[in-house]
Image (cartoon, rainbow, N blue to C red):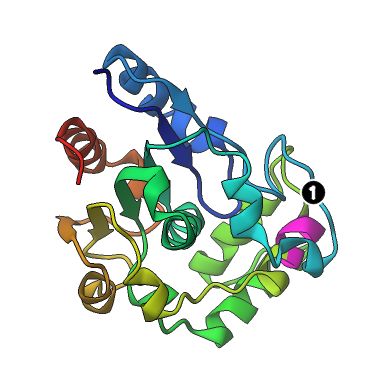
Amino acid sequence: MGKPPVVLVHGFGTSARRTWESLGWIDLLREAGREVHAPDVLGHGSAPKPHEPAAYTELEGWLADRLPDGPIDAIGFSLGARLLLGVASEHPGRFRRLVVAGVGRNIIRGDPEYRRRVAEAVAAERPSEDPGMAYFGALAERPDMDRDALVALLEGFEADIEVSRLARIASPVLVVLGDRDRSGPPTELLAALPDAELRTLRGVDHFATPKSFDFLDAALNWLSEPGG
C-alpha cells in the first residue's frame, strides 16, 4: 500500500508558499511519491482574513474541515504545530504520524505578556526596537498579510492546549525544537504525549527552523517509517 497524504501547516504570519513551497518541502515530498496538501491558515496568505477575534475561536475545527480523509501524515510549524496537535487530540484516528516543530512549553503554559507584545508589534505602523518583535511586525507588512486579521487571530485563538487533550493523541509524534528557540523547553510536551520523540536542532532559533536541513531530514525520515 502507498503512503498516506502529507499535510503541511505553516506558522503565524506566513503562508504555505513561503514556509513550505519556497524552501523545497513540497517538491521533496512529491519526489518521494507523497501527495501533499498545504493549506493557508485562516487569516493568512490566500485564506479569508476576518478581522473579528470570534472568527478564530474555532480555528482547529476550521483546519480539520480542510484536511483530506484519514489516515494522513502531517507536519506543522509553530502555530501550525499547535493546530495539528489540537486536531489530532479530537480526531486521533485521522493521523498516522505527526511532526510538530517550534513548540514546547509555550503551548502548555504560555506567556500572555509575550503574546500581547507580539500583537502590539503586528499592529504597529513603525518597527519595534526589539529585534524579535520587529520580525513579527515585518511579517505583517508582506503583501499577502493583513495586520488586523493577524491581531484578531492572536486575540481570538487560545494558544495553550490542555495536557489532558494531548494524552488523547494516538499517533507517534516527532517534536522538533531548536536549542535557541524560546518556545521550549520541550519536557512537558514530551511527557504529555503518549508516544513522542525529540529531535533537537543545534544552533537553530525559532524563526530559522523551517530552513533547517536537519528539520527537513528528520521529518522526512519520520514520515517514511511505519505508522503507529
Residue 207 drawn at (x, y percent)? 41, 54
Query: What's the residue type where badge 1 is placed?
Result: Lys
- Report the magenta residues as a range: 147-152
Q: Quadrant of the N terminus?
A: top left
Residue 209 or residue 79, whichever sits in front: 79
- Residue drawn at x 38%, y 37% is 71
Q: Residue at x 42, y 56 (%)?
A: 88
Q: Element at badge 1? A: loop
The percent position of residue 14, horizontal first and vertical second, equals 58, 45
Q: Residue 41 vs residue 104: left or right?
A: right
Residue beneath disc 1: 49
Total marks shown come to 1
| Residue at image point 23% right, 33% down | 220
Q: Residues within 10 Å of mark 1 (few under 14, many from 20)?
A: many
- From the top left corner, tell me how far across and down residue 209 is, in percent: 33, 49
Indicate whether 76 appears above or below 55: above
Res 202 visible: no
Say whether residue 13 is magenta: no
Q: Is residue 88 above or below residue 10?
A: below
